[in-house]
């Protein structure tokens, strides 16, 4: 019976892996076909939400001086919260500012139990948008240069699984590559004008 249970678990895990790989392949094809920055950002957000089964997402670009993040696009975030997060400094009380400062992913399974955001305006904005859990993952170029942040948000306390992060990290690498390419193309167009 133990062997049968282990086999069932292994089959279920394999089925999830195959489904995740198919989803990622479909997402990759959609991302590559996007022609404008706005449509690319919208697809990145939709893909992040799909892979993480989240209720909302946001993508931010690192400022040239590396001291803040600028909001590029968001989905299912309260408009007042989006306005508040238009520019996020390194010292702010959000997960993305912590991830920017430490240059590593930050996961908050429940904002009501998070010490670094306790009593901050960021915590109030998470509440306004109806979020209880959030994760922020740095976007890096292939050379390791920081580019920005990709965050997902949940309406209930939540801890993403390692499996979810494995697929999400592939998306984050693709998103960073595509954003970097889009920015380089925009800079080239501007220099030609």
Image (cartoon, rainbow, N blue to C red):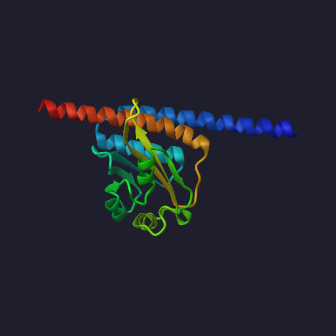
Percent from the top left, x then y, of residue 25? 50, 32
Number of labelled discs?
A: 0
**Residue 57 seen by the camera:** no
Question: Residue 86, relative to residue 144: is it above or below?
Answer: below
Q: Residue at x 70, y 39 (%)?
A: 12
Percent from the top left, x then y, of residue 167? 54, 38
Q: Quadrant of residue 62?
A: top left
Question: Residue 36, relative to residue 120: is it above or below?
Answer: above
Observer-nearest residue: 157 or 55?
A: 157
Observer-nearest residue: 107 or 32?
A: 107
Q: Residue at x 46, y 55 (%)?
A: 95
Horizontal placement of 190 versus 39: left or right? left
Observer-nearest residue: 31 or 138?
A: 138
Percent from the top left, x then y, of residue 190? 16, 35
Q: Residue at x 68, y 38 (%)?
A: 13
Q: Quadrant of residue 36?
A: top left
**Residue 85 seen by the camera:** yes
Q: Quadrant of residue 184?
A: top left
Percent from the top left, x then y, of residue 74? 37, 52
User: On the rendered image, what quadrant is the C terminus found in?
Assistant: top left
Q: Residue at x 48, y 34 (%)?
A: 26
Question: Residue 129, relative to residue 5: is it above or below?
Answer: below
Observer-nearest residue: 34 or 48?
A: 48
User: On the rendered image, what quadrant is the N terminus found in?
Assistant: top right
């Amino acid at each position: 019976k133990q062997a049968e249970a282990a086999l069932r678990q292994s089959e279920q895990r394999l089925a999830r892996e195959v489904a995740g790989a198919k989803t990622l392949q479909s997402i990759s094809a959609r991302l590559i076909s996007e022609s404008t920055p706005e449509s690319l950002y919208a697809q990145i957000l939709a893909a992040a939400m799909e892979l993480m089964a989240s209720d909302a997402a946001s993508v931010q670009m690192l400022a040239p001086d590396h001291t803040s993040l600028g909001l590029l696009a968001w989905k299912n975030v309260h408009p007042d919260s989006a306005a508040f997060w238009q520019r996020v400094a390194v010292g702010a009380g959000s997960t993305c500012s912590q991830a920017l400062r430490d240059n590593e992913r930050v996961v908050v399974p429940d904002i009501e139990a998070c010490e670094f955001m306790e009593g901050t305006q960021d915590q109030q904005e998470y509440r306004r948008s109806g979020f209880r859990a959030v994760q922020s993952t740095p976007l890096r170029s292939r050379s390791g240069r920081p580019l920005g942040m990709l965050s997902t948000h949940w309406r209930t306390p939540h801890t993403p699984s390692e499996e979810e992060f494995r697929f999400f990290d592939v998306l984050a690498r693709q998103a960073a590559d595509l954003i970097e390419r889009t920015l380089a193309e925009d800079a080239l167009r501007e220099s030609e004008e």
